[in-house]
Amino acid sequence: MTTMNKSLIHLLLVCCGTGCVANGAREVYQALKDNLTSDDKAVLAATTSARATGCHGLCAQGPFVRILPEDITYCRVKAADIPEIVEKTLKQGEVVKRLLFRDRQKKTLVQGQNDIPFYQRQTRVALRNVGLIDPSSLQDYLERGGYRTLEKSLLDMRPEQVIEEIIKSGLRGRGGGGFPTGLKWKACAATPAQPRYIICNGDEGDPGAFMDESIMEGDPHSVLEGMIIAAYAVGASNGFIYVRDEYAQSVASLRKAIEEAENHGFLGENILGSALSFNIEIVRGGGAFVCGEETALIASIEGNVGEPRDKYVFPSEKGLWGQPTIINNVETWANIPVIMERGASWFTSLGTEGSKGTKVFSLVGKVANTGLVEVPMGTTLREIIFDIGGGVPKGRSFKAVQTGGPSGGCIPSELLDLKVDFDSLSQAGSMMGSGGLIVMDDRTCMVEVVRYYLSFLAGESCGKCVPCREGIKCLLEILTRICHGQGEIGDIALLEDIAETMQQASLCALGRTASNPVLSTLRYFREEYLEHIEGQRCPAGICRELSEFWIDPVICTGCGLCLPRCPVEGIKGEKKQAHWIESDKCIRCGECIDSCSFQAIKVK
Amino acid sequence: MELIIDGKTCKANPGDSILNVARREGIAIPTLCYHEAFGGQGSCRLCTVEVTAGGRSRLVASCTYPVSEGIEVKTSTPAVEKIRRNIIMMLYKRASGSVLMQKLYREYGCSENSLGEKEEERCIVCRLCVLACEKMGTSAISTVMRGIDKRVGTPYDQAATACIGCAACAHICPTGAIEVLDSGNTRTIWNKNFNLINCERCGQPFATREQIDHVSRLSGIEDAELCFCEECRRKKLVGKMQGFSPC
């Protein structure tokens, strides 16, 4: 383990992504600033600077303080730890070991961020600046090469060349549809009507997904630069960034970036002395999941109810106010400048045959290292969940991973070696969606999980078309019944019948994919449905009416951990003797199972 | 341009929907949320048909799908019929109090299943009422909530100031879900009471004061000219025309 070189100029990066801010990152940053500038440490202030950055990605371990150039990464830092970091590390050149990342598999301490397994297998393209720059500083972005490609595109390339480059890169929309971005631009440029509009879709609504948030917060200029390049390519004069209302920090970050870009001639009239004039406005969404669907989003910007329309004519021909409109997701926009900088052939060297480049996933659920990961397309689920994510915690076993948000599908352990890209996920009955990965362990009831997703969609569908509105209602009714032990034999066929109609006849992608959770679990976990209906048993011990718990006396050590966790005092037994559950008292909450370190508590 | 519907070559204009063309050609496609006054909404999806364009077949809503040269449309395939049957089944489960839905449920041969029924409900949220109200220039009702709770209502379910009691919503409703209670000279609709005024000629109560004022304001026709019920207005017109011969 190397020590610090005190004679170098040091940069301290404090993660101030929304997750870390909730865990006191702002206080950590303030404490650091205070400690560096206090009088007796004036020397330190001259050789050290602190920077509040966007999300570092490994959210389970935040807040982070990362010291460059040595790359010493401190995890779970509290404001109270700052004096010690300043005193020991910055002044004496010693590493504070208790704050280092603990690799539980290898049982070692890891000093640098680049040595943490979570980061080692990642390729950061869309997230290239997130966590390194201060998002409020245009200077930071320029130092990382920002706006250079805009200049190159604007001054040295013709619009059609820009479009050609994006087509050649094979970039596909990162918002879920996977439509080729370049073709979308080409169609827009080929539609004669003026004016034309550019929209950034920042209405990330999947529960547990925050990749777009992290880019908007941590690297807003890359989104702006992508949009300005597109404005040049298709001849647009106005742009809109639609951000969901919950993302206050994203809005603040983007607002500041727009202001700075305007002040420096990257936005406004005659950008960089060229003929291009382009403005960007922020529109705050009202928090409806369906407004992530592009035609609903457009309706929302127009001031109408956020309901989709049929897309037999694409927005690239008839979009906002009936004009040609390019609408791309945040992550897609962040990819544009780097493709223009490094070229389409570099981009196509990453990824698979049909899906080029990288994809950011938000890895959440029952996985050790929750956070944001960016990997080349074609990385297997196993690599993402086990090598990067560190596997399922608490000695439990992996059961399924839900990809693509609430209307994605659940993929079982047999398919862990699936190479993740747009096409392979669709073939497996799921979808890429915006890149949510929710890991589930053996304490997950698949029927109950699907019921949860359907109840989410029941509130978030716009309710305009019959297959989606009434279909979700019917599916939810049947699933609820099955979870309560009132399922009937015909229910599975009925679920499949309704799900198929929803897929084929719904108006928008939300309705067409809303039945994915049902269909994918019926494909991979059909037995579990049958157990609920015919066996009147929930194998995961989640559905209360169908669960009964018992303690295996051979395994139970009588440690007593479960006793205080039982809310009804239903567990009995002497210390160091096998315990038992009084079944008439048990309310089947499952607290005991989750507290047992020996997996001695079983479901009948 | 030309397209083929169920084997028949049909002429169409750019901007036509498949449904427009089919109706002109006398080819029946069932609808619930469509009305020629408003154009296609694409919300009930009962008008789903199979379209083959550029060698690729897909299921689309015929009321919103714009025709293009050479497409081939099939208005009734097993897949289309199955979708229609399921749509009717689901809508019947929602609105089994409606006579129309009961009739369609039988017609489409929907099978009995274990889905629950709500007897009282009649509304199928086709939104024709909302569009009619909008067309009247009042917009007193709209859809409220979203997802499975979406329904039609006035703002906060209170008596709407914008409502003129014209009952256009109730007239257009295909399932009779909107209640209009006329009793003597009083009309109650959407939780609001109106006084009905009497026809100048026959003395029957026929319209609300607010409705006459609204129409007068929009059309520029004097109030006095409007105060006749439909029957008497027709008779009056015939009287006027008696002295007029086009030959």
Image (spheres, rainbow, N blue to C red):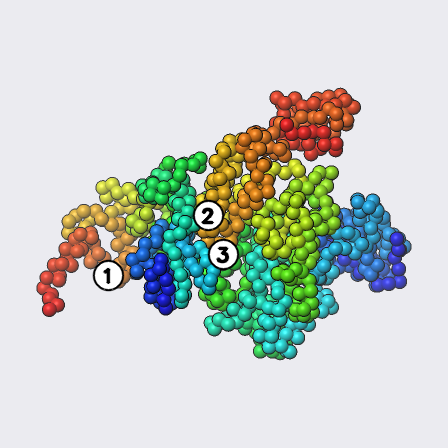
Q: Which residue is mark 3?
A: A296
Q: Which residue is mark 2?
A: A501
- For the C terminus of chain A, the quadrant is top right
Tag 1, which secondary structure? loop
User: Which one is in front in this view, the residue at disc 1 or the one at disc 3?
Assistant: 3
Mark 2 chain: A
Q: How many marks?
A: 3
Q: Is residue A548 visible?
A: yes
Front position in the image: A339 or A41: A339
Q: Is residue A560 visible?
A: no
Which quarter of the picture shows residue A29?
Answer: bottom right
User: Which one is in front in this view, the residue at disc 2 or the one at disc 1?
Assistant: 2
Q: Earlier in the sequence, mark 3 or mark 2?
A: 3
Measuring 46% from the left and 53% from the top, which residue is drawn there?
A507
Looking at the image, residue B31 sits to the left or right of residue A322; the answer is: left
Measuring 85% from the left and 50% from the top, which residue is drawn there?
A96
Q: Looking at the picture, which amino acid does disc 3 mark?
A: Ala
The mark found on residue B221 in the picture is 1
Q: Looking at the picture, which amino acid does disc 2 mark?
A: Thr
Mark 1 chain: B
Measuring 15% from the left and 49% from the top, which residue is drawn there?
B202
Classify mark 2: residues with Cα within 10 Å, few (<14), some (14-19) or many (20+). Answer: many
Instruction: Please determine whether, in this image, residue B247 is positioned above or below residue A457.
Output: below
Classify mark 3: residues with Cα within 10 Å, few (<14), some (14-19) or many (20+). Answer: many
User: Which one is in front in this view, the residue at disc 3 or the one at disc 2?
Assistant: 2
Measuring 47% from the left and 51% from the top, which residue is drawn there?
A504
